[in-house]
Amino acid sequence: MTKLWGGNYEAEPDRLFWEFNRSFPFDRRLMREEIAASRAYALALGKCRALPMKDAAKLDRGLARVLAKYEANPAYADIDVEDVHSFVETRLEEEIGSLAGQGHLGRSRNEQSVTALRLFIRGAIDDVRGGLQELIRTLVSRALEGAAAPMPGYTHTREAEPITFGHWAGAHAWALVRDFERLADTRVRVNVLPLGSGALAGTALPLKREALARALGFAAVSENALDAISDRDFAAEFVFVLAQTQTHLSRLAEDLIHYSSRPYGFLALPDAFTTGSSLMPQKKNPDSMELVRGKASRTTGSVVRLLALTSGIPVGYQKDFQEDKEAVFDALDAVLPSIMVATGVVRGVTLNREAMKKAAAAEGMMAASLAVALAREGVPFRKAHGMVGSMVTDAVKANFPLGDLARATLKGRHPRIAARMKDFFDPEKAVAAKAARGGTAPAAVRASLRAARARVR
């Protein structure tokens, strides 16, 4: 048992408790961040003359060798240590001797842990934003291809009004744009240096914390040491944004699953992202999208896990905080692959424009446009709404085309509307009429898509 404490203990920890207490099996994932922070801290000790500069440089070189050996040989990590901090110091002592302990001068694991986690999340934010950028660009590209392709739009899972494929894909793109921007906003609060806070009261060393922050790429330093080592808001906020992102990916996946199914047939998923059945030879199952949809439960669970973890505990570092990392890791491990898989599916989807257009031509979906046209002719809208609703009911009862029935009904009282009935029931003209900003008219869709693409440059 290699540990960084124990001078006042006469016996070793209980073996079962030792394993229960160890975090190295999972916090080793912070190795690069831990060593980066330790190297910066060692040099800061030299610059403030807490250590001779030659000793600080020796610590720095030794830490670099530890990281190189860790990355080169998986077996290098096979030692019985408590956490990533213990591992680094143990291996550093093998490299440079007892000077390794000086790297901990004035420093607490409380601040080490939260510093490494902030560095990790900062890098993870950049990775997720990079993935989202590619997915959004892919959605926009495919949406531009189908900017004028009519398809049904739905509310309450029922046919509502015709839209275009570009309008549908753009809706998903804009949701992800918000996630992209939320991550940038979260990064501001993540990018604050806690190192130099000590265990809770700050440090007695003359460290230049602003210079240390610059060395590690932080934009600011924490203003209260006790808060700095207690704060996990940044982790909860990051995981919430991941959960929101996964929710949006889940909705995209749900649409792709349904629109590629037999009753719809609007599109086909690429074979490379489907699987077959062990019994039924005809099957091409949308497993990729079902997994993306399913992983939303994991990210939501991680949010609840972090909020529950941090509620009701006193200010200051508590061992409870050891549980923060796995919630972060698990959410990230759900979201990043989901983004990559969704990008591949969107890129490879093939559209069945004829099926979409045929479904978009369902007469019931033109009822709203007909009611608006009557209102523009001077009929109070609520009355026009009732008139068209009655025509819909009569057409269904008589099993008669709504357009023909409406033409006959309106010919005497509203001849101009009756004369334009063919236009009202043409899905391409129906979508072209929604030309206001944000609408489903092809020109409006293209403008919206260009704006989405610009937001993620």
Image: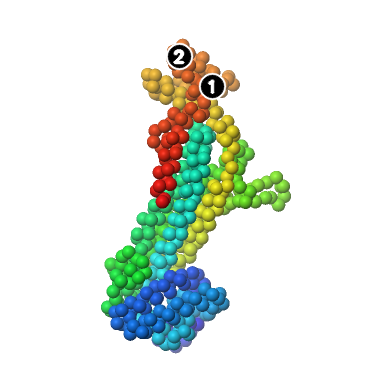
Front residue of this view, candidates 371 and 166: 166
Front residue of this view, candidates 60 and 227: 60
Please, what secondary structure does the residue beneath circle 2 have? helix
Image location (x, y in percent) of residue 98? 42, 87
Q: Amino acid at mark 1?
A: Leu
Observer able to see residue 21: no
Mark carried by residue 402: 1
**How far apart are the two marked residues, 2 and 1, measured between alpha carbons?**
16 Å
Q: Residue at x 39, y 19 (%)?
A: 377
Q: Residue at x 46, y 53 (%)?
A: 132
Residue that badge 2 annotates: 415
306 in relation to 77, above or below: above
Image location (x, y in percent) of residue 418? 48, 16
Q: Amino acid at mark 2?
A: Pro
Q: Residue at x 58, y 20 (%)?
A: 400
Q: Earlier in the sequence, mark 2 or mark 1?
A: 1
Image location (x, y in percent) of residue 78? 55, 78
Query: Which quadrant would residue 189 be assigned to in this image?
Result: bottom left
Q: Residue at x 30, y 71 (%)?
A: 211
Front residue of this view, candidates 209 and 160: 209
Observer able to see residue 30: yes
Q: Is residue 185 left or right of residue 397?
A: left
217 in relation to 423, above or below: below
Mark carried by residue 381: none
Q: Are marks 2 and 1 in contact (CB under 8 Å)?
A: no
371 in relation to 451, above or below: above
- Neighbor class of circle 1 (other Cα within 10 Å; few <14, some 14-19, many 20+) is many
Query: Which quadrant would residue 386 be assigned to in this image?
Result: top left
